Image (tube, coloured by chain):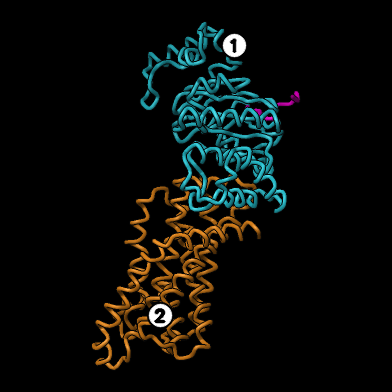
Chain colours: A cyan, B orange
Amino acid sequence: MSDRPIIRVAHVVKSFGKVTAVNDVSFDVQAGEIFAFLGPNGAGKTTTIKMLTTLLRPTSGSLELDGLDPATHQTEVRRRFGVVFQDPSLDSDLTAWENMDVHGVLYHVPRRARRERSETLLRMFELWERRDDLVKTFSGGMKRRLEIARGLLHTPKVLFLDEPTLGLDPQSRNQMWTHVRNLNEAEHVTVFLTTHYMDEADRVADRIAVIDHGRIVATGSSAELKQQTSTGSLEAAFLALTGTTIRDESATAADQMRQVARVWRR
Amino acid sequence: MTVVFILWLRELKKYLRSRVQIVASLGAPLMYLGVLGFGLGPVFRRAGEGSYLQFIAPGVIGMTVLFTAMFSGFTMLWDRQFGFLKETLVAPVPRLAIMIGRTLGGATVAVLQGTLIFVVTLIAGFRPESLLAVPLAFLVIALIAVIFSALATAIGSSLKEMQGFQMVMNFLVMPTFFLSGAIYPLEGLPRVLGALTRVDPLTYGVDGVRGLLIGRTHFGVALDVAVLLGVGVLFVLFGAWRFSKIEA
């Protein structure tokens, strides 16, 4: 791994009107790492990914991806990452092969390389036999695998996976993470992922950051987070760090104070 | 250029695979052609205006192109809702290329649908005055398609929810059609209605197609084409501007 972080986020704030979605967030991701960005619903994970992937500009602070600012070097940054969004982004009226082809053209991958790489990736993700089928006939797991394969077509340095296993059965989730792990080892692609499944993060991530109410509340390996919180599992550590309030509703003032107190205790 | 082509091709493939959409979009034009074309024919003839089928056929083609082109705005909302738009927005390509690819794709689909209706009008008994003028009429049809496809892109870029499209249909598309002179002559209209028809771009499109296909024009084909070109440039610029402002 190189010393220079491939992703650098420094004191980033993102506000939407009076709502501050991301509040003074800082972290680094090293090249080749699998980095899990965990947090409850509405914690600021997707907003952070959107800023790193050029879809949103930060209100203040700075971001870098491979040494480039996503806000000012959009095109160069976009060449360097692949992304699987939280919501599906495939064209279900096209075939798997056509989805790959459209992506390849959008990322200026030459025709021959496009074909070869598409074949390699579709075989790797066990979709080769279904390449000429319309995506709308695929299962949820197949669609997710195709999205990851597509995101890797232009050989990105960083792959963003925003809750890629949401709604998948355990078999599909297991298979997908095996693919991601293999890919990380084979192509040294940096993986930046978010998930609500703590066992997945525990299994695949080299390092983890936990965000809550727009602020980073802990970073470290899974073992370090367990140690910090004196818990036996990553899920218990996560709950200790972020509380048990359901985040689709506002957390109570007492709950927020407890969380601040936990951060201060460390 | 390849980016524009692949996005254009995508729209075309989706259209050709959607047989339901093709058949469903024939419904309204067939109704206008059948019910109005034949129903009002005798009245129109008695008024000394000749064959109403000959008169209304270019209007129905214009209507088809308008509806289909505006529908491309709905497909953009669909892409926004179901994610494909994000895939294009994070790609390292200029948004202008994406917008042009989508707009040309929507326009091509609208022209194809217009061609289908043109064939239907021929089967129903419509006869162009000169076959040589048919390709020229299709150039005007293509202009109509680009104008409304660009407008649809602008609207699709501004709306965030699919429900908004119903409002667009009721308050923009239907008035555009009814004010265009597609189903009635522009001569002798009340002053306000006459003024409204003149600010409707489709009026010039239908008038141009009618002028070329049956030799009956209110403004003259040259003026029609000039207005369409001007509005086309404006709407493409407007669509590009709105598309550049999309936040995923």
Residue at the (45%, 65%) spot, across then down: B69
Q: Can residue A215 be seen in this view?
A: no
Mark 1 sits on what residue? A224
Q: Which amino acid does label 2 sit on?
A: Pro
Indicate left or right for A126 with B74 as reference.
right
Crowd around label 2: few <14 · some 14–19 · many ≥20 (10 Å): many
Q: Mark 1 lies on which chain?
A: A
Location of the N terminus of chain A by quadrant is top right
Q: How far across and down, in percent of the image, does residue B30 sit?
A: 33, 74
User: Residue placed at 67% from the left, 36% from the top?
Assistant: A69
Residue B221 spot, x, y in % from top left: 49, 84
Inspect the magenta stretch and tell me whether residue A3 lies in it: yes
The answer to which of A186 and A91 lies nearer the viewer is A186
Q: Is residue A21 magenta?
A: no
Name the residue furthest front. Answer: A129
Give the vertical position of B84 relative to A189 (above or below): below
Q: Which residue is drawn at 59% across and 11% down?
A: A224
Classify 10 Å Cα crowding around label 1: few (below 14), some (14-19), many (20 and above). some
Instruction: Give me the disc on residue B56.
Output: none
Q: Name the residue under label 2.
A: B58
Magenta part of the protein: which range?
A1-9
Instruction: Give the amino acid at mark 1.
Output: Glu
